[in-house]
Image (tube, grey):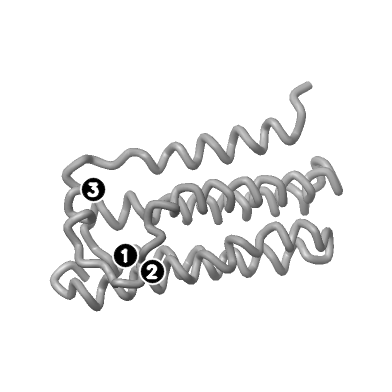
Amino acid sequence: MISSWLVIGAVTFLVAVGSFFITPRDVKWFAQLSRPRWLVFEQFIPLIWTVIFICGAASAYVVWEHDPGGIITWLLMGLYLLVEIITVTYIPLMLRFRSLKTGEIIGLSGFIAGIVLAIAVLPISGLASVLLIPYLVWSPIGTYTTDELRQLNPEDA
């Protein structure tokens, strides 16, 4: 039988890889946008998201191990998956539609879903909730950054 941590890690990885379906033309549009002066950490964003996804997968693992295969556990796994899907659709959809507003809506939706998830897993495991804190801290930063990009690039809002 395959270990639960391996299945959770594989699903996390496969969903995250799905975000790479971006055409070069779309990336070029985003690269040409004006950026706020304080956005000096942009090159670290992929590393930051990698850490966040690892923490999310670890949180899901903790919850799964608490009651493997239970109906509540499966529902929570679905919520983890929903949060990840919302998160990874941010870039492809924003770039595909060339709309910073789309990115902002997706970012806010992911943050709200992340709060619901953190609250839902808290009674099961404090550790699982704590492992979601990086997402809950970073997600609003990304959404705020997108809003700032909208302000600097109103024609691309």
- Tell me the CA gap for discs 2 and 1: 5 Å
Task: State if disc 3 and disc 2 touch (CB < 8 Å).
Answer: no
Q: Position of residue 14 (x, y in %)?
A: 51, 35
Residue lying furthest top: 1
Looking at the rendered structure, the secondary structure element under dot 1 is: helix
Amino acid found under the numbered disc labelled 2? Ile
Name the residue rendered at 86%, 48% in the picture. 66
Name the front one of labels 2 and 3: 3
Tell me the number on the disc at residue 105: 2
Provide the residue designation for mark 1: 102
In the image, farthest residue toward the bottom: 151
Q: Residues within 10 Å of mark 1 (few under 14, many from 20)?
A: some
* Picture coordinates of residue 130, whole percent (x, y): 73, 62
- Give the amino acid at mark 3: Val
Mark 3 or 1 closer to N-term?
Answer: 3
State the residue position of label 3: 27
Discs 2, 1 touching: Cβ within 8 Å: yes
Residue in the image at 35% along x and 72% along y: 38
Instruction: Look at the picture and state if 139 lies above or below 18.
Output: below
Alpha carbons under labels 3 and 1: distance apart: 15 Å
Q: Residues within 10 Å of mark 3 (few under 14, many from 20)?
A: some
Could you tell whether 22 is left or right of 69 in the image?
Answer: left
- Quadrant where the N terminus sits is top right
| Left or right: 47, with 69 as reference point | left
Query: In the rendering, at what x and y percent does residue 21 appear?
Result: 33, 38
Classify residue 154 as left or right of residue 86.
left
Quote the CA–CA distance across marks 2 and 3. Answer: 19 Å
Q: Earlier in the sequence, mark 2 or mark 3?
A: 3
